[in-house]
Amino acid sequence: MRYSAVLFDLDGTLVDSIPDIAGGVNAMLREMGFEELSPQRISNFLGKGMDHLIWLSLGVYYPDAPPSPEDYDRARALFSKHYHSQLETSVSTLFDGVVEGLDAFKAAGCRLAVVTNKPIEFTPTLLQQMSIDAYFEVVVGGNTCPEKKPHPMPFLYACEQLGITPSQALVIGDSSNDSIAARQAGIDVLIVPYGYNEGKSVQTLDCDGIVSSIAEAAQWAAQPN
């Protein structure tokens, strides 16, 4: 294996989390008197963290002016409440090849971390519900560091926590946030095509490869340079 550690994005890379996220967003919207949005539309709002998700979801119903600070704060509190409830009985699922890939990386001696823009208060619960929490030594959430992806800081922080240099790590993600942050951190990066990436194609992202699954990523990483 070419790498000592692998840093994984979460939503859209390991977990298809749209069912729970859409449930939280739509419960928020209903309580504020708005109509629900389709899960597909909500998926296009993912990638830059919870605040961005709420802002874009709420903004659908504020076409002429942004929501007031009071409306935004209320929406944020409502989403947090409803998303916490969703996670307790999560209907999210792992993407195909995730467990096989994690097992392969572990068997090869790699240390594993999650680096996500999801707030840290939600992340361990989701990992536990998916029964993959035991794989990861380090979990970095969107509010763990002063900056979130596409800033390189979260990846660099994960490397520091693992006691490795960026050149010893591999990032696996699904979006431009991952590829930009990894490149700026000096870390090799693979992209999976089945995630969210704000509804945009991943084919033009600056990365070292596009792989169909985490299992294929482990095979790619096992090949000699």
Image (spheres, helix red, strand yellow):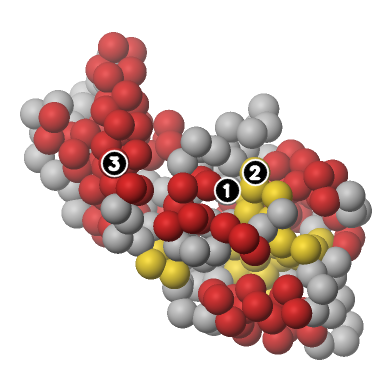
Inter-mark Cα distance, 2 to 3:
22 Å
> In the rendered image, which residue does mark 2 sit on?
140
Q: Residue at x 78, y 63 (%)?
A: 111
Q: Residue at x 43, y 57 (%)?
A: 129
Crowd class of label 2 (few under 14; some 14 to 19; many from 20; radius 10 Å): many
**Placement of the C terminus among the 4 image quadrants:** bottom right
Residue 76: which quarter of the image?
A: top left
Amino acid of disc 3: Ser
- Of labels 1 and 3, earlier in sequence is 3
Q: x%, y% of residue 38? A: 19, 54
Image side of residue 26 versus residue 172, left or right: left
The disc label shown at residue 24, or none:
none
> In the rendered image, which residue does mark 1 sit on?
116
- Of labels 2 and 1, earlier in sequence is 1
Amino acid of disc 2: Val
Q: Give the vertical position of 77 relative to 127 (above or below).
A: above
Q: x%, y% of residue 86? A: 29, 47
Q: Give the vertical position of 224 relative to 44 (above or below).
A: below
Residue 95: which quarter of the image?
A: bottom left
The disc label shown at residue 85, or none:
3
As helix, strand or loop, the secondary structure at mark 1 comes to: loop
